[in-house]
């Protein structure tokens, strides 16, 4: 056969197709995809569980701090009510208008100091509550950002 005929026949011939090579490549690609999917699922599952624990902790902390704030408010209300009743009892026993003015000004001064102290205590409890409630969320967000940067 001449060289030209051989080149022409080679140009139009169909190369042999090896199906096992393609099958092996598809299998390898599929197995790799499944492994990556499992890994991604495991990460998502871990992050969801961590988020759930963070939310549970945050809600429990919020509930306990809400109760502490309520107790502090009730204690202040009780103290103010008792002081008002004591003042009324003292006013009942006065004998002159001068005593009324003296008792009233002393009561107002004492109540202003008490309310100022109660406000400071309430603010301290509220600040503590905010810190305790936000701490788990802050750490969870920082961890999530760190995990995203690593990935």
Image: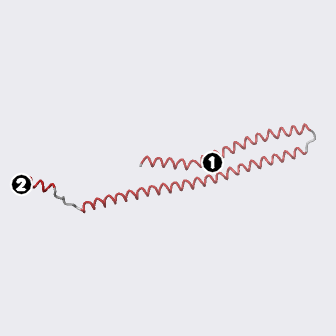
Q: What is the quadrant of the N terminus in the image?
A: bottom left
Pointer 2 residue: 2
Q: Disc 2 vs disc 1: which is toward the camera?
A: 2
Q: Would you place residue 3 above or below residue 20 in this image?
A: above
Crowd class of label 2 (few under 14; some 14 to 19; many from 20; radius 10 Å): few
Give the side of residue 149 with respect to residue 132, left or right. left
Nearer to us in this view, 42 or 84: 42
Determine which quarter of the picture holds residue 38.
bottom left
Q: Secondary structure at mark 1?
A: helix
Q: Residue furthest left?
A: 1
Q: Nearer the viewer, residue 3 or 41?
A: 3
Residue that appears at 28% across and 59% down? 25
Residue that appears at 87% across and 37% down: 101
**Residue 117 at what x, y percent from top left?**
72, 42
Which residue matches tag 1? 129
- Percent coordinates x, y for residue 106 in the rendering: 83, 39
Q: Residue at x 12, y 54 (%)?
A: 8
What separation in Å lies between label 2 and label 1 (alpha carbons)? 95 Å
Q: Which numbered circle lies on residue 21?
A: none
Which secondary structure lies at badge 2? loop
* Horizontal and vertical percent position of residue 109: 80, 38
Horizontally, residue 80 falls left or right of residue 92, namely left
Residue drawn at (78%, 41%) of the image? 111
């Amino acid at each position: 056969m001449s060289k030209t005929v051989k080149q022409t026949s080679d140009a139009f011939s169909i190369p042999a197709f090896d199906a096992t090579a393609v099958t092996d490549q598809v299998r390898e690609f599929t197995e790799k995809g499944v492994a990556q999917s499992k890994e991604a699922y495991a990460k998502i599952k871990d992050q969801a569980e961590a988020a759930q624990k963070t939310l549970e902790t945050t809600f429990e902390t919020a509930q306990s701090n809400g109760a502490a704030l309520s107790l502090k408010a009730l204690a202040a209300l009780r103290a103010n009510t008792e002081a008002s009743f004591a003042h009324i009892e003292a006013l009942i026993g006065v004998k002159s208008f001068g005593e009324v003015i003296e008792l009233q000004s002393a009561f107002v001064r004492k109540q202003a100091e008490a309310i100022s102290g109660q406000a400071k205590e309430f603010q301290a409890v509220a600040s503590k509550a905010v810190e305790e409630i936000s701490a788990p969320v802050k750490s969870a967000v920082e961890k999530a950002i760190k995990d995203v940067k690593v990935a």
